[in-house]
Amino acid sequence: MRIGRLLNICMFVLLFSAQAAGQIASPGKLSSSHASLEGVKNCTRCHNFGEKTFRDNCLTCHTEIRSRVSAKQGYHYFTRKLECAKCHKEHHGREFELVRWNPSSFDHKQTGFLLEGKHGSLECRKCHTASNIKAADIRRKGASVLSQTYLGLSTDCATCHDDEHRGQLKGCADCHGTESWKQTRFSHDRARFRLEGRHAGVTCGKCHPEKDDGKQRNGDTRYIQFKGISFSACTACHEDHHKGAFGSDCRKCHSPAGWKQLRIAEGSFDHARTHFPLEGRHANVACAACHTGGDFAKYRDADLSRCTTCHRDYHEGQFADRKDAGACDACHTVQGFTPSRYEPAQHAATRFPLRGAHEAIPCGRCHENIEINGKQSPRFRWTDLSCRGCHADPHAGQFDARVAEQGCTGCHDVESWHVWQFDHANTKFPLTGLHRDLLCEKCHTRGLIDGKETVRFRFPDTRCGACHTDAHRGQFAEADGTTECARCHETYGWRRVRFDHATMSRFALTGKHADLPCTRCHKSEIQDGISFVRYRPLDFQCATCHTTGR
């Protein structure tokens, strides 16, 4: 055999020498993937002359294929009887594609992984992605290979799917199929805790809580806990309502068939035989509401004459300084907390007797809930019984000085807020003339004072110009820009003037001037769209008004 092989090599060398280099020995250019093997000296790296197969030579370089064939895995193992050259043709030039196949007609069963259920409708590259390739020998080949190869995937579900259970369970196929993730075939009979009685009807989430580990799976960091759930005692899931009074073995009295199936039926005990007969609303209270923790001897030596033995002081000690130390039955009965037995006559004996409009106000309007000792309770104690103690100042502090001296009752009384006693003559602006006929709202309009909307009662400027527009457009203004309207006008009427042309102007009316109507000289003008009478300045030259002729 060795001699025959040597003769074949010699014949090949002689043939090569007789022809131009590479023209007869090679049937064509190698593909770009094998370009480094070009040349007659490299032929034997792939070809075994004199033998029918050279598959072992291919596997010498393509170790990733060899390792999978040896492990009896993958497509090349199940098609191992085929020659490599059957599918991968060579010597067809640099641009020729060695891997030529049609994914749509490919039989995936030849890979050893049958596509069933929803796997059958997936595109190849849905699974065969670079991120799903975990095999180290394939990943070492670099990104260009990872984006094209179909090697390197495992048949484990976790290759393509995130482990939603965070490693708690093994063997996805034990519970899930390929048809749907949510259609599980898990039976709790296979678990260490069999579901019996009422447990069988409990939803999974009641016992298997949702956790969050901060690690995203399918865009979510939450998962359901299946491992590490304690079930050795009922109290692992259920609260011990008896607070340990009957021990830790709940099954002595209860069973999975139902919590209320007890040896002692509810209501069979005659409470009238105790020192606290159940009367009024107490008769309808469940035993566990008072006997918390199952402690039926809890109140044996307790003082049950005081409601606060069982009930918290809803008023948070506001009546503790009364003679009865705030006994609840002074206002309430066992028939119900509301309505109370507190009468108006009792309120009249307090520091704040109800009079006037206060008598018609519902109790809750004044006795609103406030926080006392960190808890909500109706308010019954006040340190300030003045009007300001309950009512906000609607005047925004405009009468602080007056209220400090007289209180709100200087103007108002308890009969009605809208009835007041106010004399404008005692102010800095007594009402005279036509001012007396004006409605209050005409001058006292609403506006903002320190950011609060209210009716304005205080005016820093009481001159006419503060309220009235100057009809003369500043013709009679003084050097400081103000106009003293009272020199000519009075409050009994705007048109009643007391102007003396001889003493109050620079042009005394004499002769026929005295008989002229004012409008002959003082004519109307329009300025900025507003009409007014011109009084100043006027030219006193005769020719301004009279034509002299020749």
Image (cartoon, grey):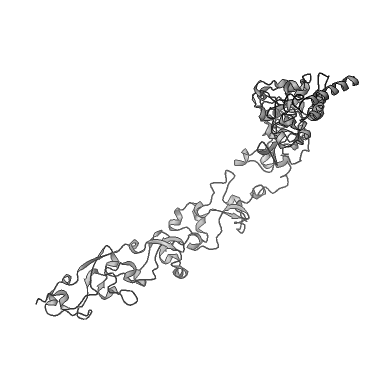
Q: Nearer the viewer, residue 418 or 139?
A: 139
The answer to whether residue 149 is seen in the rendering is: no
Where residue 541 sits: x, y (%)? 18, 78
Where residue 65 sits: x, y (%)? 78, 27
Query: Where, by quadrant of the figure, is residue 79 drawn?
Result: top right
What residue is rendered at 13% in x and 73% in y? 516
What residue is rendered at 40% in x and 68% in y? 458
What residue is rendered at 45% in x and 55% in y? 359
Q: Nearer the viewer, residue 86 or 398?
A: 86
Q: Nearer the viewer, residue 190 or 482?
A: 482
The answer to whether residue 455 is seen in the rendering is: yes
* Position of 363 relative to 8 (above/below): below
* Position of 549 relative to 528 (above/below): below
Q: Relative to 224, is 546 on the left or the right?
A: left
Query: Where, by quadrant of the figure, is residue 119 drawn?
Result: top right
Where residue 31 sits: x, y (%)? 72, 29
What residue is rendered at 77% in x and 36% in y? 140
Query: Where, by quadrant of the figure, is residue 373 drawn?
Result: bottom right
Q: Quadrant of the C terminus?
A: bottom left
